[in-house]
Amino acid sequence: AGNSDFEGEHKTSVLEYIPTGEDLLIEFTTLPKYASMHSVEEFWEFALSDLLSEKKLTIASDSTLYTIEKDGYFSQAKAYTFTAPNTERVIKAKLIVENAALYGIYANVQSADYHSEFVDRAFASFRPSDDTIIGLPITMSKADLFFEALDSHDSTQVYQASKSVRDVWFGADDSERIKEYLSNYVEDGFTRRTRLALIHKLSTMDNVNANIPYLEDLYYEKLDSSSYQFEILETLLEFDTKEAVESFNKLILDEPPFTTNEYTYSSLFHEFNDSL
């Protein structure tokens, strides 16, 4: 596996049956190492987003073929029929998620009723290999895995975790850990960009107001860094609470960040207007 595999990968191939001229598209996709979804439904929305939004397909039918869930393992198979604009042909698909991997097989056929020995047999036998399970279940938070990578102080693991902050689903219980690492963690690869991304992650938790005092203290600590100040102000606006807006007003009036970029302030106040 290459060092970029932690960011996920996508592969396609075509399975062709020469006697009839039929062919099938096979897809293999892995989620980024530290990514997870809040629900299986959210995962399927993500998995189908390219087909529905970019390729403008419409779901004509869908069904769940099976669901298997046990400790450290999740798999679900779905069957779909898609229609496309300006054609009577349809796309049949069988998609299987197994932990952090998505397997897909697609057939572009004449109609939803179309059957052939090649297509039917290929769809029936299509499944992940029994001896290869990739990653952890899609709905399992990888926050512990993220912090374990930082604690390892292994340069590769720290680099991968630091590049993956935006993928991690942190829970409310992780806010204190985030603050601890922001204040005390030092390691090559744990960059300012990583720290800024961690600050922003405080806006994704349920107990956002509990983080306001910490952000205010950090703001005054970082008066020599407009990058930190703007990130903190934007994060407060993302909190979308009355208390956070009051904190935003106090900070920006007391110690406005210095910048020569007018767009930065324009963007910030656009967010501020949206939060009112």
Image (cartoon, rainbow, N blue to C red):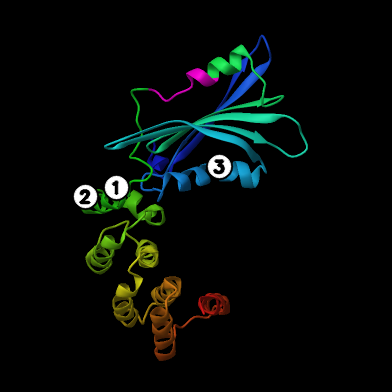
Disc number at residue 48? 3
Residue drawn at (61%, 41%), measured in percent from left and top?
51
Q: In this view, does 185 lie to the left or right of 114?
A: left
Q: Name the residue beneath numbered marker 2.
A: 152
Q: Where is residue 75 in the image (x, y as percent from the top left)?
A: 39, 33
Q: Which of marks 1 and 2 is nearer the N terminus?
A: 2
Q: Which of 13 and 78 is in front in this view?
A: 78
Amino acid at the residue labelled 2 = Ser
Is residue 68 rendered to the left or right of residue 22?
A: left
Q: Which of marks 3 and 2 is in front?
A: 3
Coordinates of residue 230 in the picture (x, y in percent): 44, 76
Q: Residue 157 carries which label?
A: 1
10 Å neighbourhood of mark 3: few (<14), some, or many (≥20)?
Answer: some
61 versus 221 height, above or below: above
Residues under labels 1 and 3: Cα distance? 30 Å
Q: Are marks 1 and 2 in contact (CB under 8 Å)?
A: yes
